Amino acid sequence: MNQYLKNLNRIEFVVTMACTGHCKHCSEGEHVANGEYIDGDIAAEAVCDVCENYQIQSLMTFGGEPLLYPEVVCKIHEAGKKMDIPKREIITNGYFTKDEKRINEVAHMLAKSGVNNILLSVDAFHQETIPIQYVKKFAKSILREGVSIKVHPAWLVSVEDDNPYNLRTREIVEEFRLLGINCSNGNIIFPSGNAIKHLKEYFGNDTEFTDPYEDDPKDIRAISFSPNGDVLNGNVYKESIMSILDSYSVDG
């Protein structure tokens, strides 16, 4: 086993960078409504191969908006279920169609594929461009399918800060609580991408920020696949995931 990955326990997929929102806090910058997405069959094969060699405890799909390509998402989670990964999660803004029939169909697909937790990105930022009524339809459909779902908001400065964005986010969180959906801890907005452009007055010039999602390169605990197949220092479209993991080093 590669010494740098001896504690590897999590697999992540950025299914696509395409998104239905245009959020001013987004760390990735501007998005379009469609675009490149990871190959579901190759992704599923990679999940199985990694699980045969490492004790993976968590599998997550996100984006962009991953449910623009729900069949891909489901192939990934079916593989996670097959390999007995305990935690199989999606982060989604819940808005991928206005068609109620399709909303219900996708919710059923997710439940059947083995997704066991959904983190719903709703807050003041998402709801500036994403119509909340369709998100609520999706949330209700997920509840009917019996899948765990929580609101997963983005907070500005801190959860406790009373800036206008957080005040609006609390109102939105309450709307979902009334539907029977509780709130996760969410996350604190990191000064990157659109956040620097639109929210810079909220970030102190003398404050040092550490990316909360960055792994120690000498102790990789999570591997993240990009829509183009990139992962660590390789590409899963060009070589097997185990070859990539076995050859990984901090020197690249």
Image: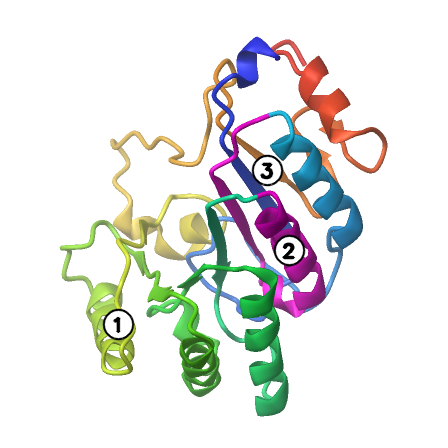
Label ID, residue 224: 3
Which residue lies at the image location 66% right of the left edge and 65% below the top edge? 32
Residue 62 belongs to magenta span: yes
Amino acid type shown at disc 2: Glu
> Tag 3 or tag 1, which sits nearer the N-term?
1
Return the x and y of residue 99 as percentages of the image width and height: 61, 89
Label 2's element? helix
Amino acid type shown at disc 3: Ser
211 above or below 100? above
- The alpha-carbon separation of the residues under discs 3 and 2 comes to 18 Å
Left or right of 25 in this view: 102: right
Range of magenta residues: 54-83
Return the x and y of residue 86 as percentages of the image width and height: 46, 45
Disc 1 designates what residue? 173
Q: Are marks 1 and 2 in contact (CB under 8 Å)?
A: no
Q: In front: 139, or 19?
A: 139
Which residue lies at the image location 58% right of the left edge and 58% below the top edge? 64
- The alpha-carbon separation of the residues under discs 1 and 2 comes to 30 Å
- The alpha-carbon separation of the residues under discs 1 and 3 comes to 29 Å
On the question of residue 190 being in view, the answer is yes
Assign the C terminus to one quadrant of the image. Answer: top right
> Tag 2 or tag 3, which sits nearer the N-term?
2
Label 3's element? strand
Which residue lies at the image location 72% right of the left edge and 45% below the top edge? 43
Return the x and y of residue 22 as percentages of the image width and height: 52, 67
Label 1's element? helix
Question: Comparing marks 3 and 2, which lies closer to the viewer?
Answer: 2
On the question of residue 228 being in view, the answer is no
Q: In front: 200, or 55?
A: 55
Q: Residues within 10 Å of mark 2 (few under 14, many from 20)?
A: many
Disc 2 designates what residue? 78
Q: Quadrant of residue 69?
A: bottom right
